[in-house]
Image: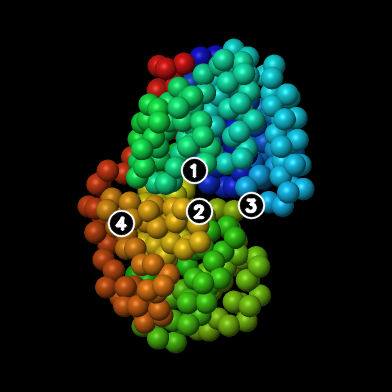
């Protein structure tokens, strides 16, 4: 394997694992071309790390209007044509989402090996569609459904900053509870954080990552020691300086928290496709120091109760959590390509 084309197009759950794998391949002296959308976050992040990029512009298809679906198909075809000469004599590495489709189809046309990465417990559409044609499928959390093809459980690649240990909170007499709804924030978690302020014992303080859309509303309602920020470019700083985390259950966010060795209360987003956040949280609750509470069962009183009784049983973090996913992925790709 001398050249790898890696698709980093999509949300943070797609491009951050792709970024970590790209850096590992480069470390192993593999030429990497990182697929991005022009002017996108993944392009900016790749540039920061000095990774060679190539811009294509596929659009999402599912859940769109008829007009948008036609535009999506055209954008996919254009992207496939652009990739035609690039994927020859290369290895493709697709990290899910609509951004993976042009790369996979181009690899199939050129008869080049390609690999899929699936972070969630419930396989996404791209995985279900192309797994039988892939050289191998890498599973972040394992799968609760049958995968057609050769599958390996590798864990999820996370940035090294999350693995630099778990600093002890300097305010030992006051534990920090981080309300972490991801880069976009969670209106439900934000509201429940506001609701528990008056009943949370004095030895706890709240730190809310609200998301930009809800920031002004939440900022206007914080009291006492509660603090709020709209977003963070360095989520590891927020996680590593917290004592307990309340979070949605995206696969990447869950893994980032897990490798940071922090206790967490997962409240899955109930409207996620195939309810995949519930199954992600279920996995984390058996392998890490985590509790799963469905949104329908979550109240302010319940959250305060869980925060108060939550222990920090670090020994539980050794129950099946894989910490070197990018190395495993590289070794398997090297062997099979």
Residue 162 position within the rendered picture, expressed as x and y whole percent measured from the top left: 44, 48
* Depth order, front residue of 214/80: 80
Label of residue 63 in the image: 3
- Residue 252, visible in the rendered structure: yes
Residue 116 position within the rendered picture, expressed as x and y whole percent measured from the top left: 49, 31
Q: Which of pointers 3 and 4 lies earlier in the amino acid sequence?
A: 3
Can you tell which quarter of the image residue 295 is in? bottom left
Contact (Cβ within 8 Å) of mark 4 with mark 2: no
CA separation in Å, label 4 and label 2? 20 Å
CA separation in Å, label 2 and label 1? 9 Å
* Depth order, front residue of 48/33: 33
CA separation in Å, label 4 and label 1? 21 Å
Which of the two marks, 3 or 4, is nearer to us in this view? 3
Q: Residue at x 46, y 16 (%)?
A: 337
The residue at which mark 2 appears reads as 273
Q: Residue at x 42, y 17 (%)?
A: 336
Can you tell which quarter of the image residue 266 is in? bottom left
The residue at which mark 1 appears reads as 124
Question: How dense is the environment of label 2, judged by Cα within 10 Å: few (below 14), some, or many (20 and up)?
Answer: few
Height in image: 152 above or below 11?
above
What secondary structure is found at the residue carrying circle 2?
Answer: helix
Height in image: 292 above or below 89?
below
CA separation in Å, label 2 and label 3? 11 Å
CA separation in Å, label 3 and label 4? 31 Å
Q: Residue at x 44, y 81 (%)?
A: 196
Q: Residue at x 57, y 15 (%)?
A: 111
Q: Which of pointers 2 and 3 lies earlier in the amino acid sequence?
A: 3
The residue at which mark 4 appears reads as 285
Which of the two marks, 4 or 1, is nearer to us in this view? 1
């Amino acid at each position: 394997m001398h050249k790898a084309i890696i698709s980093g197009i999509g949300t943070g759950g797609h491009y951050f694992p792709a970024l970590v794998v790209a850096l590992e391949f480069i470390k192993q002296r593999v030429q990497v071309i990182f697929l991005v959308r022009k002017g996108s976050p993944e392009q900016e992040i790749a540039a920061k790390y000095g990774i060679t990029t190539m811009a294509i512009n596929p659009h999402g298809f599912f859940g769109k209007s008829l007009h948008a679906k036609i535009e999506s198909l055209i954008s996919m075809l254009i992207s496939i044509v652009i990739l035609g000469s690039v994927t020859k004599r290369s290895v493709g590495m697709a990290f899910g989402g609509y951004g993976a489709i042009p790369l996979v189809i181009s690899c199939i046309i050129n008869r080049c090996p390609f690999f899929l990465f699936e972070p969630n417990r419930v396989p996404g559409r791209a995985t279900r569609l192309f797994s039988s044609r892939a050289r191998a499928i890498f599973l972040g959390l394992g799968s609760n459904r049958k995968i057609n093809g050769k599958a390996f459980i590798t864990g999820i690649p996370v940035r090294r900053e999350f693995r630099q240990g778990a600093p002890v909170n300097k305010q030992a007499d006051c534990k920090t509870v981080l309300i972490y709804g991801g880069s976009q924030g969670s209106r439900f978690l934000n509201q429940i954080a506001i609701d528990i302020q008056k009943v949370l014992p004095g030895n706890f303080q709240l730190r809310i990552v609200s998301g930009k859309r809800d920031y002004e509303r939440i900022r206007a309602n914080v009291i006492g020691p509660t603090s709020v920020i709209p977003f963070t470019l360095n989520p590891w700083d927020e996680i590593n300086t917290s004592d307990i985390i309340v979070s949605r259950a995206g696969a990447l966010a869950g893994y980032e928290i897990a490798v940071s060795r922090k206790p967490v209360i997962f409240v899955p987003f109930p409207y996620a496709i195939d309810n995949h956040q519930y199954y992600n949280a279920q996995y984390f609750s058996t392998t890490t120091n985590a509790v799963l509470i469905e949104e329908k069962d979550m109240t302010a009183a319940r959250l305060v109760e869980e925060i108060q009784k939550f222990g920090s049983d670090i020994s539980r973090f050794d129950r099946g959590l894989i910490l070197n996913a990018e190395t495993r992925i590289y070794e398997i790709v090297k062997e099979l390509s």
